Amino acid sequence: MSASELPLSATAPRRQIVTLQAHILQQQALHPGASGDFSWILSALSISAKMIASQVRRARLEDVLGGVGNQNVQGEQQQKLDVIANDILLRTLSGREGVAIVASEENEEPVILRDEQTGDRKYCVLFDPLDGSSNLDVCGAVGTIFSILRQDRRSAKQEDSLLQPGTQQVAAGYVLYGSSTVFTLTLGKGVDMFVLDPSIGAFVRVEQQMRIPRANKSYSLNEGNRLTFPEGYQKYLHWAQENGYSSRYAGAMVGDVHRILLQGGVFMYPPTKKAPNGKLRLMYEANPMGMIVEQAGGKALAAPGQRLLDVPPTDIHQRTPVIMGSPDEVDHVIRHLQSG
Ligand code: AHG
Ligand code: MN
Ligand code: MN
């Protein structure tokens, strides 16, 4: 049989197999003067993701479920796996020359790794090591969220370098430890998604230049807090329910925003009586997830007229209300907030 007689599936090239490592090297090649520092940081995040995924999968077998009996700086109960995931990220990132400062949701103070005053600017890496960790005990979705900023050498104190708005992020992403392990990354030019193939131990690209659906009648928020939301959110919920919307809420921002990235909808964490600025953290959750959503063509706001990535940070642990997702769905929420 000649090549022209072969069935199309045997001759036509199917989607290329590109691993996360290959993708990182391809991106580095676009910057001929690059030192490689940045690529090494991304590779540390990829290795951390594999290590955390393996811990999450074995959590019940290894008896590392449940709390450690401590509260973190946010006043929340730390789970054993919060501490394990945090430790993995700190250990992998501290070995990378390009990392100057690391800041974690689980550590009160940032960790200054390198403070030499000469040479190239280095990077700051901020992360939520395990997002949605209260889902762990029930095998629910959990994730890791990260944000990378360039060190700002003009800052008086090293840690002030961290207080840059989300627009300054050079990269952001999340890892979802769900029925498969998904690594979603933006370097500021679109969003790519990778899935861990456990049989080869590599993340393989499954989506390139993702686009969030313009609209989908689905909202995601903790409706148990409804009575203490500002009036505009209550009006929105009333309108959405009259118009045939579905409600989906995983209790882990990574899980909820991942679904919305693929299927559309809107994710919100509004101000509540208990949490007047909302619950989510600007630097570890809102900014990186906001960058991903915007890079996929969505919108990410803190309030009407207030883009999340423009919120000026004053404290690395500060909280912010969040409204993000499909552009049309975010617009519907904002319209009700403006009329509230
Ligand atoms: P974390 O586990 O890192 O503290 O984050 C949990 C966050 C977020 O992922 C989720 O959307 C939200 O908290 C859930 O909060 P409620 O239980 O108040 O709905
Ligand atoms: Mn979180
Ligand atoms: Mn967390």
Image: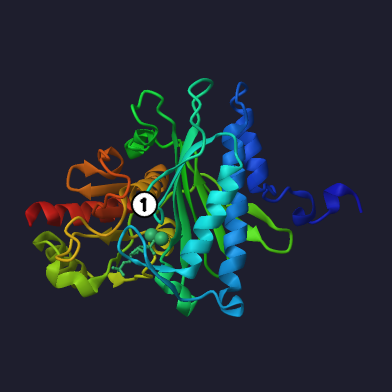
Q: Residue 152 at x, y = what percent?
A: 40, 28
| Relative side of 235 to 78, left or right | left
Question: How packed is label 1: few (under 14 Cα within 10 Å), some, or many (20 or more)?
Answer: few
Question: Is residue 122 visible from the viewing direction of this image?
Answer: yes
Quadrant in the rendering for residue 224: bottom left
Ligand 3 within 8 A of label 1's CB? no
Counting every numbered tag in the picture gives: 1
Q: Which of 166 and 184 is in front in this view?
A: 166
Q: Residue 307 at x, y = what percent?
A: 25, 42
Q: Which of 124 and 327 is in front in this view?
A: 124
In the picture of the structure, the residue carrying the numbered disc 1 is 108
Q: Which of 57 and 335 is in front in this view?
A: 57
Residue at 11% of width from left, 61% of height from top? Answer: 230
Circle 1 sits in a helix, a strand or a loop, which is it?
A: loop
Residue at the outermost right position: 1
Image quarter for ligand 1: bottom left
Q: Say above or below: 202 vs 168.
A: below
The quadrant the N terminus occupies is bottom right
| Relative side of 298 to 99, left or right | left
Q: Say above or below: 112 vs 70.
A: above
Residue at 41% of width from left, 37% of height from top? Answer: 169
What's the amino acid at mark 1?
A: Glu
Q: Say above or below: 56 vs 303.
A: below
Q: Residue 179 at x, y = what percent?
A: 55, 70
Q: Please, which colouring scheme is shown?
A: rainbow
